Amino acid sequence: MIELDNSTKELILDEVMTQDRAYKFIDELTLANSILYKELDQVKQPHSTTDFNDLFNKLLINKAILNSGPDVISDYIQQILTWLKDTTPVRYSVSFKPRHEFVKKLYAWTKKNLQGAQLVEIEVTPEILGGVKISLNGKYYDFGLEKMVEQYFIDNKNAILSILQK
């Protein structure tokens, strides 16, 4: 049996990054696992290249399991599936649909600043005036502009009222 180690988890996270892509990778791993025991002529649908071909190759070559037989490969795939399904993402709420470069930067920031293997999930919430809201392990952090302005008025209420009453 080949164990799923931390360097392999990091390799997967660095390629997948987001929970949405993790779901796609899970689907492709499940498909790959389902055809392990079939002969090539038994595979009903054509299998073209996927978003994760390079990752598949790195995972299989990295562990040198290509020639290990379907049972070893299937067990390894199951370990990856179980781990990915159990990985809780860091949830970010932003006011815009992020481009891929933004997602990469957000993932890099998450990886650098938050402990543990983390996927990111990005939710577009147009109501946010600016900034970001973050949810992690049941804790919620509001770094939105609205919250900052609201806090400013709370902290400076008396000074603001004295200026307005002049």
Image (tube, rainbow, N blue to C red):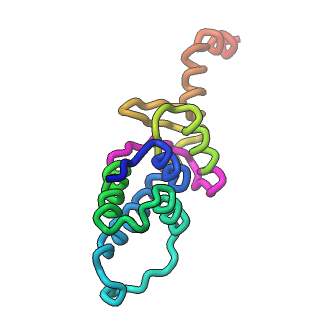
Picture residue at 43% right of the left edge, 31% below the top? 140
152 shown above or below 55: above
Picture residue at 36% right of the left edge, 32% below the top? 138
Residue 1 is situated, as x and y percent measured from the top left of the image, at 31, 53
Residue 166 is situated, as x and y percent measured from the top left of the image, at 71, 11
User: With 160 as the anchor, is 19 left or right in this view?
Assistant: left
55 shown above or below 86: below
Whether residue 97 appears in this view of the structure is: yes
User: With 95 as the anchor, is 77 left or right in this view?
Assistant: left
The count of marks equals 0
Q: Camera-side residue: 133 or 101?
A: 101
Name the quadrant containing residue 30.
bottom left
Name the quadrant containing residue 34.
bottom left
| Residue 90 inside the magenta-drawn segment | yes
Whether residue 120 appears in this view of the structure is: no
| Residue 156 inside the magenta-drawn segment | no
Name the quadrant containing residue 65.
bottom left
Picture residue at 33% right of the left edge, 68% below the top? 69
Residue 124 is situated, as x and y percent measured from the top left of the image, at 51, 51
2 shown above or below 31: above
Seen as rendered, the residue at the extreme bottom is 41
38 shown above or below 130: below
Q: Camera-side residue: 144 or 66?
A: 66
Q: Camera-side residue: 57 or 138?
A: 57
Give the magenta-colored segment's residue range.
Answer: 86-103
Residue 161 is situated, as x and y percent measured from the top left of the image, at 62, 13
Seen as rendered, the residue at the extreme front is 67
